[in-house]
Amino acid sequence: MSDHLEEIPLFPLHAVLLPYERLQLHIFEPRYREMINNCLEYDLPFGVSLIRQGQEVGGIAEPYLVGTAARIDQVHRYPDGRMHVSVYGERRFRIRRLIEDKPYLVGMCEPLIEQKQFGSPRLLSLCAQMIEEFRLLINGMLARPDFNIDIQLPEDPTALSFVVAKFLNLDNTIKQRLLELTSTEERLDELIPLIEKQIIESKVQDVKRLTVEHLSEWITPN
């Protein structure tokens, strides 16, 4: 346990936010309007945690202990006080203690640290395999199969694992499992079969075809 705990305001959701992932939120409850305004005033992130038990609106929700710090980068305000905010996932945290003396939950949190990587042959092999599988998935889902693309992915294995995971259609329980893992090798081990499963499903099901606009964050057209 870390000697220093960081105070992070929490926004429990029926959703998992991964590092490097973007999320759009409509803020209408007064308690969360107050939270967002405080974060904007002091340039602070808030924590997104998957709800283990409870509801998003009204009452108290029990969050999973591992979540992701969300940085606000766009805000649209409505005349009645509601807000639409765009956030992106930064670092992960683990809640060690909950504080409930404010209108919204606050967590005393420590960083969730990924195990050190030393560029092992197995790690490099898993990265190469996942990139190849991901390319197959993307090419199979493009609305224009004759359109050549160059997929731009991070070189860092940990960042790579989360960037690929955020694209996949995954249940929240699976995303939470991937978020909580602190071994990049284990995360890649779990991701590769998930990608392979979605490749098979994309061939046999009537899936929604992607356009280049859907992939603008990851690809450069040639």
Image (cartoon, helix red, strand yellow):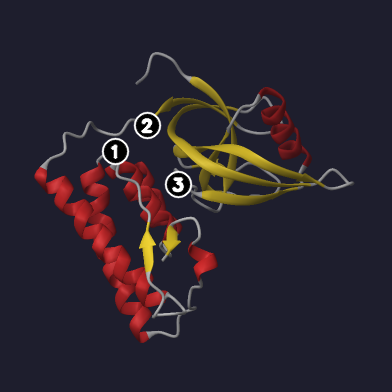
Amino acid on which disc 1 is placed? Thr
User: What residue is disc 3 on?
Assistant: 18
Label 3, label 1: how many angstroms apart (C-alpha)?
A: 13 Å
Q: Secondary structure at mark 3?
A: loop
- Residue at 20% x, 55% y is 128
Callout 3: few (<14), some (14-19), or many (20+) C-alpha neighbours within 10 Å? many
- Residue at 43% x, 60% y is 219
Q: Name the foreground residue: 97 vs 43.
A: 43
Q: Residue furthest top?
A: 3
Q: Residue furthest left?
A: 121
Q: Is residue 97 left or right of residue 87?
A: left
Q: Are marks 3 and 1 in contact (CB under 8 Å)?
A: no
User: What residue is disc 2 on?
Assistant: 112
User: What residue is disc 1 on?
Assistant: 182
Q: Name the foreground residue: 50 vs 121.
A: 121
Callout 1: few (<14), some (14-19), or many (20+) C-alpha neighbours within 10 Å? some
Query: Which x, y percent locates residue 98?
Result: 54, 28
Q: Secondary structure at mark 1?
A: loop
Of tags 3 and 2, the one toward the viewer is 3
User: In the image, is residue 215 above or below residue 66?
Assistant: below
Q: Are marks 2 and 1 in contact (CB under 8 Å)?
A: yes
Q: Quadrant of the C terminus?
A: bottom left
Amino acid on which disc 3 is placed? Leu
Callout 2: few (<14), some (14-19), or many (20+) C-alpha neighbours within 10 Å? some
